[in-house]
Image (spheres, rainbow, N blue to C red):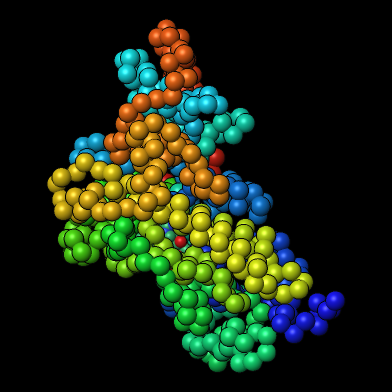
Amino acid sequence: MQDQNKNPNKRPPVRRVVICGGGTAGWMVAAGIAKVLGKRLDIKLIESDEIGTVGVGEATIPTLMNFHNLLEINEQEFMAETQATFKLGISFEEWRNVKENYIHSFGFTGTDHWTAGFQHFWHKGVERGLAGDYGDYCLELKASLEHRFAHLPNNGMNYAYHLDASRYAKYLRRLSEPRGVQRIEGKIVRYTKHEEGNMRGDVRSIVLESGQEIEGDLFIDCTGFRGLLIGDAMEETMEDWSQWLFCDRAIAVQTEAVADAVPLTRSMAHQAGWQWRIPLQHRVGNGIVYSSRYLDDDTAQKQLLRNVEGRTLITPRVIKFKPCQRRQTWKGNVVAIGLSSGFLEPIESTSIHLIQRSVVRLMQMFPTTGGISQSDIDEYNAQCNSEINHIRDFIILHYHVNNRTDSQFWIDCREMSIPASLQHRIDLFRETGRVFRVPNELFAENSWIQVMLGQGIMPASHHQAADLMGDEELKHFLGNIKASVDRTVVQLPTHEAYVRRYCGRPESVKAA
Ligand SMILES: Cc1cc2nc3c(=O)[nH]c(=O)nc-3n(C[C@H](O)[C@H](O)[C@H](O)COP(=O)(O)OP(=O)(O)OC[C@H]3O[C@@H](n4cnc5c(N)ncnc54)[C@H](O)[C@@H]3O)c2cc1C
């Protein structure tokens, strides 16, 4: 048997990790690697103040909490530092049709039976005139509508955060540097590659404008849309999804906070896209996401500014993107994390989630003492691809299933052909009310149900288990759930008061 250490095809063990880029992705990677292997590795992070970060990405989903738990982050400290607020879901306004709104909340709705989800019992209740809105049976949804929030025992309230992205990166930097991350300021202008040996084709070093050369064994490309290493050096291509996702531009602007912060991201549909409003403690993040095929930048900017509250704090800026994903996000000794790996669009706040999933996945598959192995790379890429495909389908669903007739954009979204995997999910729900979560999938059944109902798909039938309940029993069953939700909601403090007490800072005082 051949001694592994003498195997000429093996790469050497990874000792030097070079993180290129210091946006949300760069610092999340740095924090994750430093927490686990900071004592063992030489970790460098290169960022350029001159280039800056994308400066958006402020709404998250509940999974961020898992990452924070791994990093042993104190929630109150993190929220104060990043001027964060709580988020219970997303308010989709006029997506299904003009003047029709719904909420995709982070909670559970009703109580499932093992054979049939709650939606089957609710469906029967609707048929018999015994049920209210589907959302009446979800605590988080009702609390968000009333702008209320509190931590409840046994994680009884599912939530995420709205946070200030640039403060978040600074906060993670403060955690990472004492754990061994060395930050280097500078602009990467070139890279060199191994010309021979078993690392042939891998990146050997990056070179800064100052002339400083930094060598590494593993490079994490967090250079944002530029994708300096994964794209330029490794020539990894993108799978383009613009046949399903038409939006390719955004304009972002921050405004003064002039009203109480609500525990919801607002997503307001427009003529050719949608607008976000993200309330933080000290300001509000706003932006419009649109398709340049249907709307020019000037008109988009006017539409955005017509619909913001409070004085603008920065000059609005256009961000161009393409809905796409690298075919492989780990290639050779380069792993792309963050916008360098691809970007769908921000409607369900999935990008920061994907960053933390990639960090956790990388830590789980961190090269062994035997060096980088192709089987780790293949497994990592397969897991990333499967995860992103489900998210892609979920996002397309929001656009495709709509009843809007007021603009060509929405009509074209409705009439486009969609991935077979999504068509199957829609058909299944439409005919039977059933939804199944696929292994390794981010969005659970209740997310799919809320969005499918919200966008206007009402199932044609329900599971026969629901028919075993007589009308009186069903009325009680539904009524008890609703009453319990209502009882809890009225006891909650307002979100604004809770945040101020829990993690508020004097600087969060509103502008008059
Ligand atoms: C319009 C829009 C809205 C979004 N909203 C959300 C949201 O609500 N929720 C969410 O989860 N995600 C959102 N995202 C995605 C989110 O912004 C990103 O996932 C997140 O900010 C991570 O970005 P990044 O770190 O990959 O890239 P960037 O922030 O662009 O950082 C790139 C880093 O690389 C450095 N760099 C680049 N080139 C060089 C070079 N040559 N030399 C040295 N350094 C270099 C830069 O200085 C910077 O530090 C949104 C994205 C867009 C476009």
- Front residue of 198/26: it is 198
Residue farthest along the front direction in this orientation: 1
Q: Name the quadrant containing residue 141.
A: top left
- Front residue of 309/447: it is 447
**Residue positioned 41% across, 63% down in the render:** 343
Query: Which quadrant contains ligand 1?
Result: bottom left
Relative vertical location of residue 276 with respect to residue 339 in this rendering, above or below: above
Q: Quadrant of the N terminus?
A: bottom right
User: Residue 293 placed where, x, y %?
Assistant: 20, 64
Residue farthest along the left direction in this orientation: 406
Q: Is residue 369 left or right of residue 365?
A: right
**Residue positioned 54% across, 54% down in the render:** 81
Relative vertical location of residue 245 with respect to residue 192 in this rendering, above or below: above
User: Residue 127 placed where, x, y %?
Assistant: 32, 18
Q: Is residue 39 left or right of residue 140?
A: right
Q: Is residue 258 left or right of residue 325?
A: left
User: Residue 271 placed where, x, y %?
Assistant: 19, 52
- Front residue of 360/73: it is 360
Q: Name the quadrant containing residue 138.
A: top left
Is residue 199 at all visible to an observer of this figure? yes
**Residue positioned 52% across, 26% down in the render:** 115
Relative vertical location of residue 151 with respect to residue 410 in this rendering, above or below: above
User: Residue 43 placed where, x, y %?
Assistant: 66, 73
**Residue positioned 56% across, 47% down in the render:** 439
Residue farthest along the top direction in this orientation: 472
Q: Name the quadrant containing residue 403.
A: top left
